[in-house]
Amino acid sequence: MRPRSTDSGFTLVEVLVAVVILGIAAAGIIPAVRALILSSQDHRGQASADAVLRSYSEAVEEKVRDLFVLCPTLAQVTPTAAEFSASGWSLAIAPVSTSSSPVAADYWIPSTADFRTGTWGNKTACTTAAATKCPTLSPTPPECDGGLMRVRVTVTSTTTNPSRSTPQASTELLVRRGQA
């Protein structure tokens, strides 16, 4: 018999078992890391959408604040490209109520002298209420309507990834016209 060698080391079976264990661990970790990266991308896109939405809403409020027009249309309250631009984003303003036409806003129509009670109406209701409030003035001045508009502001990313959701944010915006 030959004497046993004093060389120490791992047997082939021990090495194969270790490799299999590492492979199983990697198979569980790699998809989790991928999911984490994709989730982070989604969150970054949503955070960017929220930031653009906030900036765009402020631009709408600023434009409306300086607007002295009786019951203005959405086109009149939409900031121009010179007033606001966001590369890579689609910007939209729409009425909140579904009964309004796409080019109309929702207007606050006070029912009494107390501004707290009333209903939301379309442009026709706004101009009618303004003419009722100031019947002796012709044409009816902008100060005669309620001055409060409600619009939905939406921003959507124009960069798309078919495997991921498109970042988008939307909010209802109440703006008071003619307030400096």
Image (cartoon, rainbow, N blue to C red):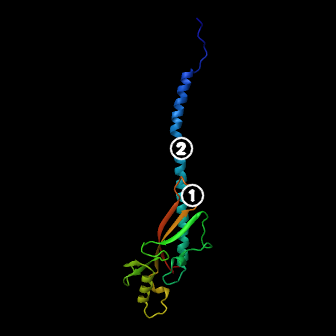
- Front disc: 1 or 2: 1
Q: Residue furthest top?
A: 1
As helix, strand or loop, the secondary structure at mark 1 comes to loop
Q: For the image shown, how many numbered marks are present on the structure?
A: 2
Q: Are marks 1 and 2 in contact (CB under 8 Å)?
A: no
Residue 108 spot, x, y in % from top left: 42, 79
- Graded by Cα atoms within 10 Å as few (under 14), some (14 to 19) or many (20 or more), the crowding at tag 1 reads few
Question: Which of the image's four quarters has the N terminus?
Answer: top right
Q: Label 1 is placed on what type of residue?
A: Thr
Residue bearing the label numbered 2: 33
Vertical placement of 61 versus 158: above or below? below
* Residue 97 location (% of width, % of height): 42, 72
Q: Amino acid at mark 2?
A: Val
Question: Quarter-wise, where is residue 60 in the image?
Answer: bottom right
Q: Write the residue at 38% across / 78% down.
A: 119
Vertical side of 32 occupied by 72: above or below: below
Q: CA distance from mark 1 to mark 2?
A: 22 Å
Residue at (56, 25) in percent of width and height? 15
Residue where numbered disc 1 is placed? 160
Q: Position of residue 102 (x, y in %)?
A: 48, 74
Residue furthest toward the right?
82
User: Which residue is rendered at x = 49% and y = 88% of the image?
Assistant: 141
Q: Is residue 44 above or below residue 110?
A: above
Q: Quadrant of residue 11?
A: top right
Mark 2 crowd level (few <14, some 14–19, many ≥20, 10 Å Cα): few
Snapshot quadrant of residue 30:
top right
Earlier-in-chain disc, 1 versus 2: 2
Q: Is residue 7 left or right of residue 65?
A: right
Measured as percent of width and height from the top left, residue 89 is found at 58, 64
| Residue 33 sits above or below residue 59 on the image | above
State the SS at label 2.
Answer: helix
